[in-house]
Image (tube, coloured by chain):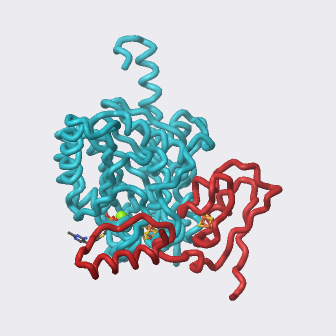
Chain colours: A red, B cyan
Amino acid sequence: MSAKDKRKNVKAEAEIGFVTTISFPSVGSAGQTGSWRIFKPVKNEERCNECLLCWIYCPEACITKKLSINYDYCKGCGICAVECPRNAIQMVKEEKQ
Amino acid sequence: MRLKDLPEEELFLQGSAACQGCPGSMALRVAFKALGRNTLLVVIASCISVLQSPFPVSALDLPVLNMAFASGGAVASGISAAVRRLKKRGVFTEEPTVLVWAGDGGTYDIGIQALSGAAERNTNFIYVCYNNEAYSNTGTQRSGATPYAAWTTNTVSGKQEWRKDVAQIMVAHNVPYVATASLAYPMDFYQKMQKAKSIPGTKYIEILAPCPPAWKFPSEATVQVSRLAVQSGLWLLYECENGHTHYTSGTARLIEGRSSAKPVEEYLRMQGRFRHLFSPEKDEKRVGEIQERISGIVESLKFTAKMREHIMDLEIMPRP
Ligand SMILES: Cc1ncc(C[n+]2csc(CCOP(=O)(O)OP(=O)(O)O)c2C)c(N)n1
Ligand code: SF4
Ligand code: SF4
Ligand SMILES: [Mg+2]
């Protein structure tokens, strides 16, 4: 269920007189946090030796164990690029939409 | 054990409300991997209350109770008692882990009474303090964990006192397990969390959490700052099991002389909260005081380690 659907659900519950104070787990609970980004991590597949350091250090869990970056939620903090021992990730300025 | 052996499942969901480069979310991810889904989480008022995101959604894929600031130890005691009773009734096939997650404000200052009580009763739970050395959530006020000379909004020319050491206060409670951890050494942290899960009774783990907005460094440097804290000898990594302390990871390398300590100045210079120590000119006195204190501790640890080996060789003391 998306965050939006959940908000709708809670609204519906409130209308029928049942108000819950429980939050439900959801990806994107603070919205598409990818829009916070100023710099974007771009990976050079050839340099990567799959050490998994970027996976474990990404504070947002935006890099999967198969090492693909989810740009919908990546906040562009730059930790993956700094910690990559093989310089396989570069931070590139985002283009204006 | 290696990084590739860590579970893939994420119980910290992407798209949370945490700041860029947040140490809290980084620590939560690793801790959740170590403890797994069968965990009951108590979050004490802190940034973690906020980064879960606003009602009715949450970035934490676990049962979570958000509780009042001073209550970590007390709430854990209640939950732990309930778990024990439900286990007797055969409600669980596998007993859940009770985990309290609190900031340094919620641990060093306002929550220490409840924590001390729970520890004295040897309540069965894990208490994690993620120590960002200030009240970050309310805009960086000083706490008992704020280090000497650090800027906060109410120590504008640098804190005048040294920080206290709650991990050692917990060691003095004689709980079965106390450990310290660093974000730069995730395997070390993971293994300590796993060990804590396997031991009954009170477990206290404290992880240093360099916070970009409060410590004033760029978001990309969270892990670098964490690493320098260990490499300089300022943050010691150890675990204390039933009163026996042994140093781990980067700190063990320092003490055994396999690596030499980096100057603390390197660590201080990375952070805007220490800027007044270096501009307009270097404050030799305070930087010197900090370095001297750290060097003193590292040297005494080296000495103790040597003495212990020596004494064990003589076999006049029973081996632990
Ligand atoms: C009794 C009480 N006093 C004050 C607050 C406001 N408050 C909420 S979080 C917080 C700061 C917590 O600091 P810390 O425990 O270090 O966690 P951090 O924000 O640094 O993650 C404060 C003062 C509160 N929730 N309850
Ligand atoms: S820039 Fe930060 S949030 Fe984005 S993938 Fe890298 S570590 Fe994760
Ligand atoms: S202020 Fe610090 S601890 Fe709080 S959410 Fe931001 S980075 Fe994390
Ligand atoms: Mg804090």
Q: Looking at the image, which residue sits at the far right?
A: A46
Q: Is residue B210 above or below residue B81?
A: below
**Percent from the top left, x then y, of residue B73?**
22, 51
Nearer-the-camera pick, A37 or B65: B65
x 27%, y 36%: residue: B201
Q: Where does residue B119 sit, x and y in percent of width and height? A: 22, 43
Front-most of B60 and B172? B60
Q: Which of B204/B233 is in front?
A: B204
Indicate the quadrant containing the C terminus of chain B: top left, top right, bottom left or bottom right. Answer: top left
- In the figure, is residue B178 to the left or right of A58? left
Judge whether residue B315 can be spotted in this image: yes
Q: State the image coordinates of residue A58 (x, y, percent, origin top left).
A: 58, 60
Relative to B219, say whether A68 is above or below.
above
Residue drawn 47% across and 34% down?
Answer: B302
Question: Which corner quadrant of the image does residue B6 belong to?
Answer: top right
Q: Quadrant of residue B244?
A: top left
- Total marks shown come to 0
Q: Is residue B157 visible?
A: no
Q: Which residue ends up furthest to the front in the rendered image?
A: A16
Residue lying at 42% horizontally and 30% vertically, measured from the top left: B304
Say whether residue A31 is left or right of residue B151.
right
Quadrant in which ligand 4 is drawn = bottom left
Quadrant of the snapshot with the N terminus of chain B: top right
Residue lying at the far bottom in this picture: please name it. A97
Q: Is residue B227 left or right of residue A39?
A: left
